[in-house]
Image (cartoon, rainbow, N blue to C red):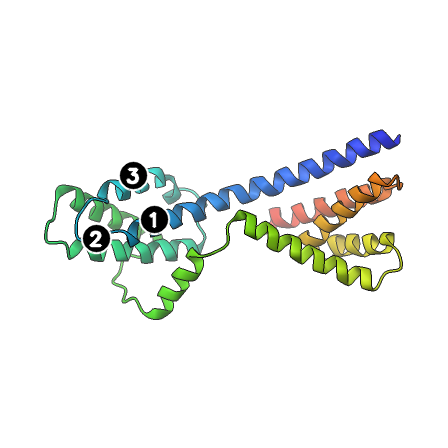
Amino acid sequence: MSRQETLEELESVLEGFLERVVSGKEKRLEVLDGINRLDDIARRIGDGNELTDQIGGWFAEHNQWLNDKSLRPADTGRISRILDQIDARLRTNPERSPAMAKIEAEIKRWQHHTGGERKIVLTRGPEIAVKAEAERPGSLARFSDLMERITRRFDDLAGSSQHILSALDDALKSAEMQQNKEALILSALIIYSLKQENYKVDPYVRRLKEAERRIKGRRAGA
């Protein structure tokens, strides 16, 4: 295999790997964004019913959540708490309207599916939890955190290695044996960097593929 062919294969591996990472995160980010939007609507409900259209639109847009497996238990718990807040405010509104009654009926339907069809007394603990989750960092911040963790991992490997190839070998071992995704990404970065410096990286590319296959197999079996 020529150097150009190896480089093209490595680029293909990295592109495929990144595409799978992005694809797996995209659905999760959509869920978090949807829940945050519902939370924003709940926070802006006043004494009037000017936001009932927005609430109804949110229910219509995310109706598929009731039938698929997009939501985690923490997601359904948070949605249930937000719906409790909305329901409580609507019930205390003296100017009840057909639109508000429809929203209340839709809330009951969602609470039935999310397991929140019950009276809940909100205490400071859940409020703090809701606020903390609402303030979770965005995708850019999470990626920045990932890069910081990868950098710290490389610093640890470099401190006990005599050469970059030794650090790469240790990173690949961690990815292969521990099925560590951060070690896998670090290995890919090192391999790509070495390839740019004309190192022969074919064996490492094969190990990278095998480590990725194992990690993917573990996730599929989880």
**Residue 46 - label:** 2
Q: Position of residue 100 (x, y in %)?
A: 17, 46
Please give the name of the residue rendered at 27% of the width and 42% of the height, measured from the top-left corner: 54
Q: Toward which corner of the image does residue 151 lie, by quadrant? A: bottom right
Q: Quadrant of the N terminus?
A: top right
**Residue 57 - label:** 3
Counting residues from the N terminus, which is met first, the one under dot 3 or under dot 2? 2
**Residue 158 - label:** none
CA separation in Å, label 3 and label 2: 18 Å
Q: Circle 3: is it few (<14), some (14-19), or many (20+) Cα within 10 Å?
A: few
CA separation in Å, label 1 and label 3: 10 Å
Q: Is 15 on the left or on the right of 117, as rendered? A: right
Q: Circle 2: is it few (<14), some (14-19), or many (20+) Cα within 10 Å?
A: few
Q: In terms of depth relative to the viewer, which is nearer, 66 or 168?
A: 168
Q: In terms of depth relative to the viewer, which is nearer, 86 or 72?
A: 86
Q: Toward which corner of the image does residue 24 lie, by quadrant? A: top right
Q: Is 71 on the left or on the right of 17, as rendered? A: left
User: According to the image, label 1 marks what residue?
Assistant: 38
Q: Is 51 on the left or on the right of 75, as rendered? A: left
Q: Where is residue 115 in the image (x, y as percent from the top left)?
A: 33, 56
Q: Is 30 on the left or on the right of 218, as rendered? A: left
Q: Circle 1: is it few (<14), some (14-19), or many (20+) Cα within 10 Å?
A: some
